[in-house]
Amino acid sequence: MSPLSINDQVKKQKRQVKKGYPVINKFETIEEVNEYLGGDRIVCLLCGRDMKTLGGHLRQIHDNMTCDQYKKRFGIPWRRGLICKESSKNYANALNKRVENGEDFRSRLPEYRKLAHEAPHRKKCKAVIGAATQRAIGHHGLDYQYKDSDFLIVLQLMVEKQIDLRTLCAENDSIPQETSVYGWLKKHPKMNQKYYDICDSLPYSIQSKCGIMGPRFEKEVKQLHSQGKLPKEIAEITGVTIMTIWRAIKK
């Protein structure tokens, strides 16, 4: 068998479509999108093959299809990457290392803003519109089926599970969701303070997910800094990013 025929055979095998593919329907909700992109591998909805990233596969196997064309076809939000959870984490770590090594991305912001301004408008997918609608409902307090006791359970679960609000709500559909909780906290200042106290009691790596770094964190960072620790060393001790450490030092 000649090398050419072997290559042709490999290409033919790669192009084989598994039973049940291609998928016809688009994603309806953001939860479906999260489930699709949240695994160890991501399945191509055109042929059924699973891999860590889809970009190269789409170009090589599916007639140079772009990631945006794929997202439009299946209703995936434009800002979501076609990569599995592990690869996404690896990319984030690589970016953090570039920041640690002194690379300044801020100088390129004007260029990115110009490109974004000149780019054609792209219609939001159904999943994003649905999520925005749910956020609006929660923000305006229209989720009347929840009582104060339901929101108190959310705060209690944060303490018991040592988990941030967003992750907790994403894992449990039976409790008030994130935007609803924030709307409730806004109406109840004492509970809002309790929420801040709970965030302050959580491990620092979880606090950063809450977007709230409390006085306990700031005190420890400044203490470590006064002892001669470098921001990189403090970040490793506390389990947060270097940028978070810098913000605490500058306060």
Image: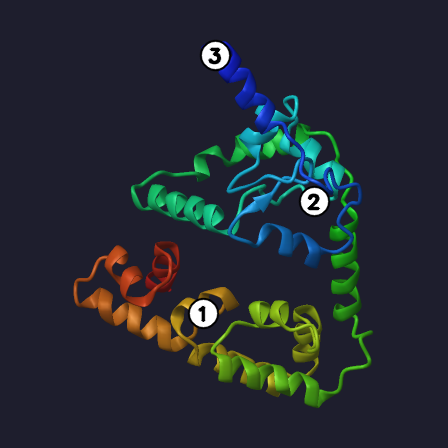
Mark 2 Cα-neighbour bin, 10 Å: few <14, some 14–19, many ≥20: many
Task: Give how far apart the Cα atoms at labels 1 and 3 are.
Answer: 58 Å
Amino acid type of the residue that numbered disc 3 sits on in the rendered structure: Met
In the rendered image, which residue does mark 2 sit on? 76
In the rendered image, which residue does mark 1 sit on? 206
Residue in the picture at 50% in, 83% down: 159
Mark 3 Cα-neighbour bin, 10 Å: few <14, some 14–19, many ≥20: few
The answer to which of 19 and 234 lies nearer the viewer is 19
Amino acid type of the residue that numbered disc 2 sits on in the rendered structure: Ile
Q: Do the residues under discs 2 and 3 have CB atoms within 8 angstroms?
A: no
In the rendered image, which residue does mark 3 sit on? 1
Q: Quadrant of the C terminus?
A: bottom left
Amino acid type of the residue that numbered disc 1 sits on in the rendered structure: Ile
Quadrant for residue 113, please give it.
top right
Q: Position of residue 176 (x, y in %)?
A: 70, 76
Task: Give how far apart the Cα atoms at labels 2 and 3 are.
Answer: 43 Å
Q: Is residue 39 left or right of residue 28?
A: left
Q: Do the residues under discs 1 and 3 have CB atoms within 8 angstroms?
A: no
The answer to which of 109 and 156 lies nearer the viewer is 156
Q: Most extreme residue toward the left, as rendered?
A: 228
Q: Secondary structure at mark 3?
A: loop
Q: Position of residue 107 (x, y in %)?
A: 44, 35
Q: Is residue 242 visible?
A: yes
- Pair 1/3: label in front: 3
Q: Is residue 211 visible?
A: no
The answer to which of 99 and 159 lies nearer the viewer is 159
